[in-house]
Amino acid sequence: MEESYKDRTSLVKGAKDIAKEVKRQAVKKVNKAVDKAQDGYTQRSYNRFQDEEDDDDDYYVQGGNYSVEANDDEGSSEATEGHDEDDEIYEGEYQGIPNMGEGKDGMVALGQPMRDEYKDRQELETERKADEEELAQQYELIIQECGHGRFQWALFFVLGMALMADGVEVFVVGFVLPSAETDMCIPNSGSGWLGDIVYLGMMVGAFFWGGLADKVGRRQSLLICMSVNGFFAFLSSFVQGYGFFLFCRLFSGFGIGGAVPTVFSYFSEVLAREKRGEHLSWLCMFWMIGGIYASAMAWAIIPHYGWSFSMGSAYQFHSWRVFVIVCALPCVSSVVALTFMPESPRFLLEVGKHDEAWMILKQIHDTNMRARGQPEKVFTVNRIKTPKQIDELIEIESDTGTWYRRCFVRIRTELYGIWLTFMRCFNYPVKDNTIKLTAVWFTLSFGYYGLSVWFPDVIKHLQSDEYASRVKHFMNEEVSHFVFNFTLENQIHTNGEFINDRFIMMKFKSVTFEDSLFKNCLFEDITSMNTYFRNCTFVNTTFYNTDLEQYKFIDSDFINCTFFHVRTGCQISFDDDYSAYWIYFVNFLGTLAVLPGNIVSALLMDRIGRLTMLGGSMVLSGISCFFLWFGTSESMMIGMLCLYNGLTISAWNSLDVITVELYPTDRRATGFGFLNALCKAAAVLGNLIFGSLVGITKAIPILLASTVLVCGGLVGLRLPDTRTQVLM
């Protein structure tokens, strides 16, 4: 009995030993197969891209399953479409992220990698960098499989509307500035604040929204910033006080500042390598369209003073306010259209949201295939490599019970995260590129915006000189019992006597009366612009329903005079005002002149390279500045303006493409936002310097602009060529 029990015990023990050995060998074979499959895929991916670099014209992608093992710490999102075990699995269907620990509870196989909690940060960052390099190669293959079609074109027009809104915001300031300042009676000392305040808001907004796009996503950041711009732009058209108007335009600029960095980062991440340079250049055309739209609307709306209404004497709604509302339409359109677009799949992969990224990539593939008439073509990607996620340890105060404390901690945490991402733009290996890009962005912005302000100011200076040369002088005139019911313009009356005269339903435009006497006169229904009475005497004179306020009478005496229904506030009138139409027409031509440059840059961006176009365009722009020596008339200055804008646009387009390609995905929008903020700072500096030199000398603006543009172009030639690189 005991012997049979011992035999049975030994049999059970032997069976257990055999089972353990079989299980151990099976686990070892599975691990070897996984490692071999992953190494084979990686080798095929890199060999494939090596072959593509030898032949830039061949981007054929073979069908197949791109399957890469996911990391242990990758999570799945709520958007995953799960399947029951009994569901049929067909080719191309997403099967979820495999759990490497299934069936091995409490067991650690031989050769299993070390858990993340036992690794230091440097090791984790090294692994993440390797994962990002592998993702870059695989993502390029996936985008090529998805193709370029209906989805990219739909996103192209949606993001183009956002970029168009940015162009409108830049131009609307210059167009509204004269009318808004006159309507609100702003003295010359505060007239420059409107232009500077908008650029200040755009500078802060570019940095903030660009950093936020790397934290919460491109689509989310763009939706918020465009909504802020649209709300405050619309609100600014109704406010009456100049201070509140400045406040609204400041936040409007803050919102639109995030458009450029977010739009280019967003669109570049759904384009294949061979399409990126060309289509990003086509996207730049919307900025030009925004300038043309603003110029055309200003030309059609602002001079029509009759398009206005008033509610008493306190509320005035003039035509320039209608123009502000119309200029907000591109922003509103982009916000509505963005709600139907998905997030950037490359961003989702970067933050570890594998499932959502897969579903969006499948949507892109299916949309393009249906548009091509190939709906049966299957999306063959099952799993995509996601970089290792490194947890950031952020200290949070314990006193966060109240809602405002939680809000404060959340805002402070996000701002700190944006700052950390910005500081990483100055780490190896992108530090040198950031420094060079800083120099190029600053020099191009300083020269472009400086001369862009200088050109119109010089034209207006030439116009004012010509207008002043045609002034009419009247000396020692005596007029009595005469009825003035017509317009007086560009006249100076000195030592005149007006006895028993009536000035009824007339306009004074740039008229000055000096040392004159008005006796027994009547001023009724008078509208005046730039009209002043200096050292004049009024005796028994009546003023009824006029806008002749006290500040228009300088050192004048009144004897037995009465004022009835004096219209307060500044009066705007563009009736027969040639200069107003002329300014809009000049800006329209200058903006339209960049169309040939846009077309050339889009067609040649991938053929001659980004660096050649950037350096060549900036050097040629610097050389063209010397032609300004010959600009002695309005027509010649307009021709120089068109030539200059046409040459610089190629530099802007190539610089936008280079910037998005030089930064990795986790700091692409942040780096672009910082450089765009620097662009706005350089624009303000250029406006101040070049604007102060109008009418003084031509030598300094010409030499300064040409020097900075040529130096910036030479620095740009030192940047690495990104034409054959995948999007890192």
Image: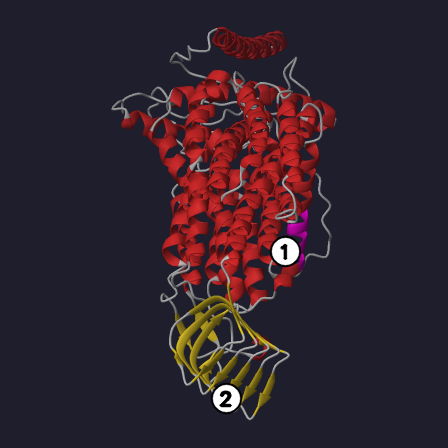
Tell me if mark 1 has few (under 14), some (14-19) or many (20+) residues whose alpha carbon lies within 10 angstroms of its own. Answer: few
- Secondary structure beneath label 2: loop
Q: Residue sitting at 54 percent across and 43 percent down? A: 455
Our reading of the magenta stretch's main secondary structure is helix
Please state, as top left, top right, bottom left or bottom right, where the C terminus lies in the image: top right
**Residue 689 image position (x, y, % from top left):** 67, 45
Tell me where the magenta segment starts and ends, as one range. Answer: 405-413
Q: Mark on residue 366?
A: none
Q: In terms of depth relative to the viewer, which is nearer, 326 or 47?
A: 326
Residue pointed to by mark 2? 541
Residue 229: percent from left, percent from top: 50, 52
Number of residue marks: 2
The quarter in which the N terminus is drawn is top right
Say which residue label 1 marks.
Answer: 407
Tag 2: amino acid: Thr
* Separation of marks 1 and 2 at Cα, in angstroms: 65 Å
Is residue 382 in view from this perspective?
A: no
Mark 1 residue type: Cys
